[in-house]
Amino acid sequence: MSDTQQFDLDAYLDRIGWKGERRADLATLRGVHLAHALSLPFENLDPVSGRAPSLAPGDLMAKMIHGRRGGYCYEHNTLLRLALEALGHRVTPLAARVVVGAETPMSRPRTHAMLRVEVPGEPQPYLADVGFGAAAALLAPVPLALGTESEGAGRRHRLVLLPHDGPLPLWALETYDRRAADWAAQYAFTLEPFTAADFEVFNWHVGTNPRSPFTHRPYVQRTTAERHLSLDGARLTESRADGTVTERTLSGEGEVRRVIEEEFGIEVPAGLRLLGG
């Protein structure tokens, strides 16, 4: 069965609450991107349980659209790619190095997936990404053009070039940090295309490697219009739209499970040990 046959556009759009037009235009791209980001949580419960999640469209539909689950970047952006292609866009998967906290961009492997989207009638393609899993992640696609600042749902981003020794230009997506009053890079990438086979390898590495942080503790994110909620192990962080940030440490396994299910809307698999397992 082909990817197109496994993917159900009607069910996907119903799950994210999109009631607008179904066209390959910029308004639809922006609307679907935002609706996805505000509807489907980011989570890594499959890697915590010891396995990499399936990227097969049918399995993603069962887990994230028909089930009370989320996913991480490969899952989110695979679903978005399938939806945008069904709407008539030409989409090219890209891969990036996450540079938050890195000494240099090239010190990190390419482990993040995002999308280059061509929009009919627009002079440049767009960078779309609903799977970064951070309080300053993209909520709206940004033009794939250097130096242009973009604001989407209250978040500011821009694309710049970084110096490096490779044969292809190294782009970086930066976000404006209001508390630091400065720009900060999120990830770095080049524009060569990647394939489903590439992401199967990346997914296996991130989802099963004992050195991957995703295999050791829950990392869960949820964005709404009013706030961004993040759970890293037992540390719960709430970032409000006005810039207020509050943190607290949950008391243990039971409270972590309850918060994931009630605050993030995720059904925790039976028997999964979330802390110290």
Image (tube, rainbow, N blue to C red):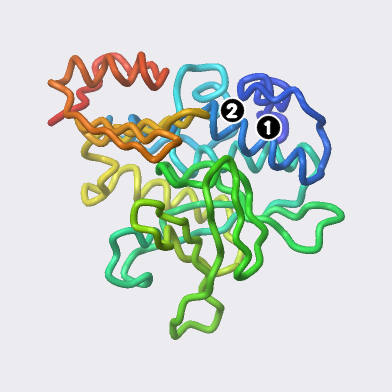
Query: Based on the displayed image, in which of its 4 quarters is residue 35 positioned?
Result: top right
Tell whether 239 sits left or right of 5: left
The answer to whether 13 is drawn above or below residue 216 in the figure is above
Question: Where residue 242 appears, x then y in whole percent?
Answer: 43, 37
Cβ atoms at labels 1 and 2 below 8 Å apart:
yes
Question: Where residue 274 appears, x then y in whole percent?
Answer: 21, 26
Residue drawn where x is 76% and y is 51% of the image = 90
Tell whether 227 sits left or right of 45: right
The answer to whether 165 is drawn above or below residue 228 in the figure is below
Badge 2 crowding class, 10 Å Cα cut-off, few under 14, some 14 to 19, many 20 or more, is some
Query: Disc number at residue 58?
Result: 2
Query: Disc number at residue 1?
Result: 1
* Residue at disc 1, secondary structure: loop
Tell whether 245 sits left or right of 62: left
Residue drawn where x is 28% and y is 60% of the image = 101
Query: Disc number at residue 93?
Result: none
Q: Give the label, 1 or 2, closer to the camera.
A: 2
Question: Where residue 178 appears, x then y in whole percent?
Answer: 40, 52
The amino acid marked with disc number 1 is Met
Badge 1 crowding class, 10 Å Cα cut-off, few under 14, some 14 to 19, many 20 or more, is few
